[in-house]
Amino acid sequence: MIYDVVVVGGGTAGCAAAYIAGKLGLKTLLIEKNIHLGGTITSGLVIPVMKSGNSQINTEFRDALIDECKKLGGQTTYQNNPAWFNPEITKIALDNLMKEANVEVFFDTNILGIKVDHNHIKRIKITKEILSAYNDELDVSQKILSVSVGARYVIDATGDCVVGRICDCNFLEKNGELQPVTLRFMLGGVDIKKFADWLIEFDKDRSVTTVEHVDGYIHLSTACTWDADKHWALMPLFKDAVKKGILNKYDTNYFQIFTVPGMPDNIAFNCPRIIDYKNTLEVKSISKALRLARQNIYRYLQFCRIYFPGFENSYISNIADMLGVRVSRRIKGKYVYTIEDLKSGKKFDNPVVVSNYPVDVHSNKKGASHLDMVNDYQLPIESLMSADIDNLFVAGRCLSADFLSQGALRVQGSCFSMGEGVARYIAKLLN
């Protein structure tokens, strides 16, 4: 089999890259370690896809996903944002989109090794097969199936830049440049109307709490953090729960909830944010974070049952299959994007992202997180090109950017645009 593009990682950026490459007529292979696509949306339960301004580019895949999820009953438009997705329906929608674009998908597949020759990826060894980036004959002894790939281009959309790490690329991360991870979850069995009626009266701040009726369903959102940048109406409840031993003090560091399209009795939680860990790339640290998070989730369940009307009969309906990692590896690209580029709105010849999503950096210390609003900014394609491997691109949070600018660009909307932008750029190179 001859491919034009091999995409490693079937999350937000990887799906966008594969779909657009396929739609542009490129023979495309998408390699995914899980048994479904979607990454943060599906495995991570990161919903909704946050808005990133009105000037976004490379949005064909995003729009296609919205349309497909809507067709399947797993999408809603809330707070003027059409990218509210049902994570389970999204798995089906992504399968449909890859089929539509003639993308071949390998599920349950991990990268075992990569052969690099003269700054080119030549072979990718996966769990059951070996893929070659050239049209050369490979060893088929010992019943190893070898596939010839004519693409000459690989897109690393793994988030942790797995391909780049195996290829011994240079990276930008520094000690101390970390953000806390989150393990999202859902509670089912919630009386949404009862909760919404109470919530809208309890918190009058519409910049924090909203309730809307959309297509016959109630949709809502609210939040509370231990930072003092707002008056959080829910904070007295959290303090009382800490005093009574229902919650731990650090459980109050971040709390945010949303309704879910197509799940009329479920609430999705953007928490717990785990602050007692060291490094997102260390197995021991991440394992500790997972255990802490699941204990935290159970405490949240008890808290909600006691303090929130409508949650009396709630239960844990879903815990994410993956941690929500905000930053890990950042590859050194042909251009290292900086916070100065972002804040100045610097223009580039080949932009792949246009966004105004704020610089969003979470901290494990009280009052140290910040959300800096900015005007429109652009990201160049060169920040998605490896400086070390000629036929390697990246897409997603592992882009070539400094710590603060990555804090703005890591979000799903920008990852969609990165994946799509890389695919379009490669299509031009091949044509």
Image (cartoon, rainbow, N blue to C red):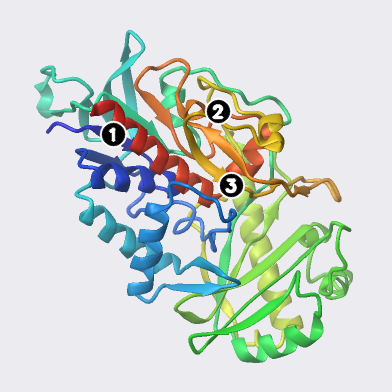
Q: Nearer the viewer, residue 141 or 23?
A: 23
Tell me which amino acid carries mark 1.
Ala
What is the spatial separation of the Cα atoms under label 3 and label 2, in whole angstroms? Answer: 17 Å
Residue 33 point in image, percent of width and height: 36, 44
Which label number is shown at residue 400? 2
Contact check, label 1 and label 2, Cβ < 8 Å: no
* SS at mark 1 in the image: helix
What is the spatial separation of the Cα atoms under label 1 and label 2, in whole angstroms? Answer: 21 Å
Residue 189 falls in which quadrant of the image?
bottom right
Residue 49 point in image, percent of width and height: 53, 59
Question: Reading the chain from its start, which is encountered first: label 3 or label 2?
Answer: 3
Within-10-Å neighbours for mark 1: few <14, some 14–19, many 20+: some
Q: Nearer the viewer, residue 371 or 295?
A: 371
Please say whether residue 95 is visible from this viewpoint. yes
Please say whether residue 404 is visible from this viewpoint. no
Q: Give me the residue at 63% from left, 32% from top.
A: 346
Q: Give me the residue at 62% from left, 37% from top.
A: 406
Q: Which residue is mark 1?
A: 427
Q: Give me the residue at 51% from left, 73% from top.
A: 77
Side of 197 relative to 353 (left or right)? right
Tell me which amino acid carries mark 3.
Ser
